[in-house]
Image (tube, rainbow, N blue to C red):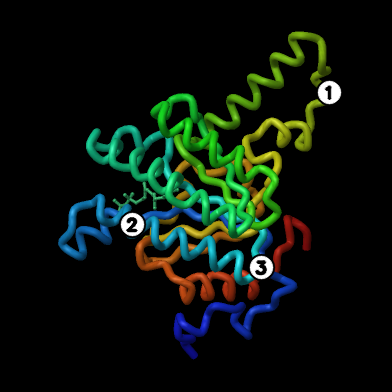
Amino acid sequence: MITKPSALQQLPADLDGERLPKHVAVIMDGNGRWAKLHGMPRFMGHRRGVDTLKDLLRCCRDWGIQALTVYAFSSENWGRPLEEVNFLMTLFERVLRQELQEMMEENVRINFVGNLESLPKSLQEEIRRSVENTRNNKGIHFTIATNYGGRQEIVQACRAIAEQVQQGLLQPQQIDEALFERHLYTSDVGDPDLLIRTSGEMRLSNFLLWQVAYSELYVTETLWPDFNREEFHYALRSYQKRERRFGKV
Ligand code: FPP
């Protein structure tokens, strides 16, 4: 039975509230294709993508999911036409400015991961403000990967650890997975239980390479601007049908 979106304000009855993923990560793909399909310029797809993201964040809160991490801009995305890159940077900045008040009211804790120093200064300032302001919020933990690359994250962790070894603060034999994870951008939010990718591509695209080692993957053909609560419901239903073994029998 397909549940009407209006009926999805609360957790759908066929989902078990005790077995929800604690942390959901999303590769939001397909904005450009969505715009093309509707005879619109690409930037309209990104605009619609923001609406989708806002509703998914609310949905996670309504249904009791503790953390949402999204891939907003990869370190490879700089290779897009300058006009599109500039549009995205301005969009991120504007959305952050406009939504901060509501995020505070909804108790959202915002975090950014990635190489933030190469972003435009005004966007960096907006990021700093939103992270600072929401730092003590106790609601959903919302992480936005911007100028993020998984390999780059691993390299910067290695470098930080190597520096500690060089300074004599750490012995090589003390390096284990737990220590390594403390040097990743995601140290305070941990690994996603479920990774969703929209628009049908079957790849990780350099997203959270370390962290998704045991995540359940869900790929849908749906383009990101069309990903709604009903689609999220399907993803969670699929997740709950799986048995997570973490390499054990
Ligand atoms: C992928 O679609 C989408 C992006 C590169 C941008 C995603 C950003 C948003 C949805 C806005 C998020 C806003 C904030 C504030 C975090 P694509 O352009 O690669 O689509 P295509 O593969 O169809 O070309």
Tell me which amino acid carries mark 1. Gln
User: Regarding mark 1 in the picture, which secondary structure is present there?
Assistant: helix
Name the image quarter holding the C terminus: bottom right
Tell me which amino acid carries mark 2. Gly
For the point 72% across and 71% down, which residue is it? 19
Mark 3 and mark 1 lie on one chain; the one further toward the N terminus is: 3
For the point 26% across and 58% down, which residue is it? 33
**Which label was assigned to residue 30?**
2
Q: Residue under label 1, please give it.
A: 173
Farthest residue in the left direction? 39
Name the residue nearer the viewer: 62 or 15: 62
Farthest residue in the bottom direction? 1
Classify 194 as above or below 93.
below
Name the residue nearer the viewer: 3 or 59: 59
For the point 53% across and 29% down, which residue is it? 152
**Which label was assigned to residue 64?**
3
Label 3 environment density (alpha carbons within 10 Å; few <14, some 14–19, many ≥20): some
Label 2 vs label 1: CA separation? 44 Å
